[in-house]
Amino acid sequence: MKKHEQLAAIKSVLVEISGQLARLNGDPGEAEIEIGAAHAYVWDMARGALRPVTKINRVPLDLLQGIARLRDQLFVNTEQFAKGHAANNVLLWGAKGMGKSSLVKAVHAEIIEKAQPSDPRLVLIEIHREDIESLPVLLRGLAGRPERFILFCDDLSFSEQDSSYKSLKSVLDGGLEGRPANVLFYATSNRRHLLPRNMIENEQATAVNPGEAIDEKVSLSDRFGLWLGFHNCDQDTFFAMIEGYVRHYAIPVSEADWRKRAVEWAQLRGGRSGRVAIQFVRQLAGEHGISI
């Protein structure tokens, strides 16, 4: 390698290191977003780039039982957005293990499969909770592109000392730059209001106007136009989940056998949910030499 080529390579590395250090110190800088052939990406704040996901961890939409109304609402909202029409940011909140993140990924896959050649590409981008402050940089890189983007944050919540929720609030609705028309924000959370109760109470106790303090906290969730609430499932729904998986993966086990074992499995796990159901099905599949 010639000397000038070596110097160019060193300069490129130093520029990347400098950018990473700046982002780690709270200065997100700018990002040159590259979108390839993949339908899903993960936002890498440290590099200011999107990392393609070649194989998405998801289940078919029709295997998600007990959430038909929520499924239909999310599908309609997402399809409207994919076709270039108006749609809402979505907060999927409630009981753990009931398919919130699975539903987002399954709906995305279903719409891609049914898309017409003339439809804009629908791209799913996962952003980690700790990278929320870099949202403005990512949005500026996505604005004006022909694709439609769903930014997805799984298990979103904020601690008492965390002020980054203000950045998210501004991005979702009301900021000077605003949210680009080709971007929606989907989030899952166990809490409907995303912030712990004691955080709201502390703000209320120290505020000049306690009512305004509560409004400040609750207004973050208000930025999501569509709220989808997930609740714990009953035994019939739990059995329907397992039955769907057993049939889908062709696991050779009798219904009487798996029902009895499923009850015992749920008792050992302390409750019923979609997550508990698929974990039980994995056990059954493994016993019969089936990979799922």
Image (spheres, grey):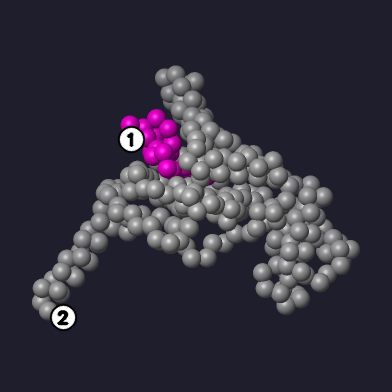
| Residue at figure coordinates x 71%, y 74% from the top left | 290
Residue farthest along the left direction in this orientation: 3
- Judged from this view, the residue extending furthest toward the front is 118
Residue drawn at (49%, 49%) of the image: 119
Question: Between marks 1 and 2, how big is the CA–CA gap?
Answer: 45 Å
Residue at figure coordinates x 86%, y 67% from the top left: 254
- Which image quadrant: the C terminus? bottom right
Task: Give the crowd class for mark 2: few <14, some 14-19, many >=20 residues within 10 Å.
Answer: few
User: What amino acid is labelled 2 in the image?
Assistant: Met
User: Which residue bears the numbered disc 1?
Assistant: 177
| Residue at the farthest top position | 209
Does the magenta-highlighted stretch encompass residue 154? no
- Residue 255, quarter of picture: bottom right
Residue 208 in view here: yes
Extent of the magenta region: 165-187
Query: Which numbered marker is on residue 267?
Result: none
Task: Decide which of 157, 9 is in the foreground and name it.
Answer: 9
- Provide residue 266's location: percent of width, then percent of height: 77, 57
Picture coordinates of residue 232, whole percent (x, y): 72, 45
Residue type beneath disc 1 = Glu
Give left or right: position of 205 versus 244. Answer: left
Q: How many marks?
A: 2
Which residue position is annotated with label 2?
1
Callout 1 environment at 10 Å: few (<14), some (14 to 19), or many (20+)? Answer: few
Could you tell me which secondary element the residue under label 1 belongs to? loop
Work out whether mark 1 precedes mark 2 in sequence or the reverse, and give the earlier one.
2
Give the position of the N terminus as an image quadrant: bottom left
Q: Residue 186 or 265: which is nearer the viewer?
A: 186
- Where residue 287 appears, x then y in whole percent? 75, 75
Position of residue 228 measured from the top left corner of the image (x, y, whole percent) = 62, 39
